[in-house]
Image (cartoon, coloured by chain):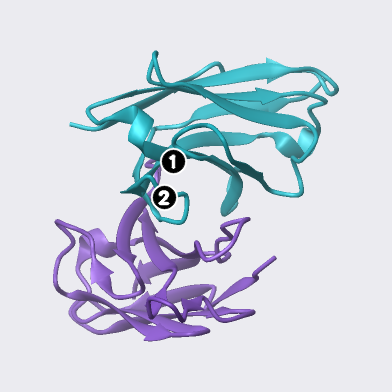
Amino acid sequence: DIVMTQSPDSLAVSLGERATINCKSSQSVLYSSNNRNYFAWYQQKPGQPPKLLFYWASTRESGVPDRFSGSGSGTDFTLTISSLQAEDVAVYYCQQYYGTPYTFGQGTKLEIK
Amino acid sequence: EVQLLESGGGLVQPGGSLRLSCAASGFTFSSYAMSWVRQAPGKGLEYVSTLSDSGGSTYYADSVKGRFTTSRDNSKNTLYLQMNSLRAEDTAVYYCAKGQSQSSSWSPFDYWGQGTLVTVSS
């Protein structure tokens, strides 16, 4: 199984400041035949199901604010929030869908400092 | 509007069985892979299973393989999860989720239900 490891486990950032969450996969999730990373980011707010933010590592899902960005390739990926808003408080998860089981990272809890 | 509505959760004794359902609407159900993901209380997301659009291919996490069976009835737009030999560690909210890409199991989950709670306890 591909192991997804996020860092940090929790993060406190001031409103308006940048937040960065990292995710590392135990093997590459880049499929060479189409040059796509089979990698996604999700946001989960308390009491809600997860919401897809990014797929193919950097393609923003419709409706996701552009202060959110996804980057990386192969085994190392980053989710960045350029200017933290109060509504961004949530737990963020990475996921690979390169191979089953489609494993998730352990989650990063983002809070306001 | 895409909607996924899980049902069938509840309290069950260790060793017991339960069948979850996920009623889908707002999209062509038969064209998309569907998955189950669970979340134990206060914990992270755990992948459970994916079933291809046709139902011909199924994938399971090792933790449920041999105990859980995912199926679908495309005529009823419904996904199922049959859970047997339940253990305390199966206690979780179970979400059904829709694959994003048509006719591909290798896609992220773009819509999720609200989840149904399964509690395994004596």
Side of B69 relative to A64 (left or right):
right
Give the drawing colour for chain B. Answer: cyan
Q: Is B88 situated left or right of A101 in this image? A: right
The kind of residue on which mark 2 rests is Ser
- Where residue B104 sits: x, y (%)? 41, 50
Mark identifier at residue B33: 1
Q: Which mark is residue B76?
A: none
Label 1 sits on what residue type?
Ala
Query: Quick check: A93 above or below A71?
Result: above
How many neighbours does mark 1 have within 10 angstroms: few (below 14), some (14-19), or many (20 or more)? many
Where on the picture, by quarter, is residue A14?
A: bottom left
Q: Residue at x 23, y 84 (%)?
A: A17
**Residue A83 x %, y %:** 18, 79
Say which residue label 2 marks.
B104
Chain of the residue under label 2? B
Discs 2, 1 touching: Cβ within 8 Å? yes
Q: Using a 10 Å C-alpha cutoff, classify the residue at mark 2 as few (fewer than 14 neighbours), some (14 to 19) or many (20 or more).
A: some
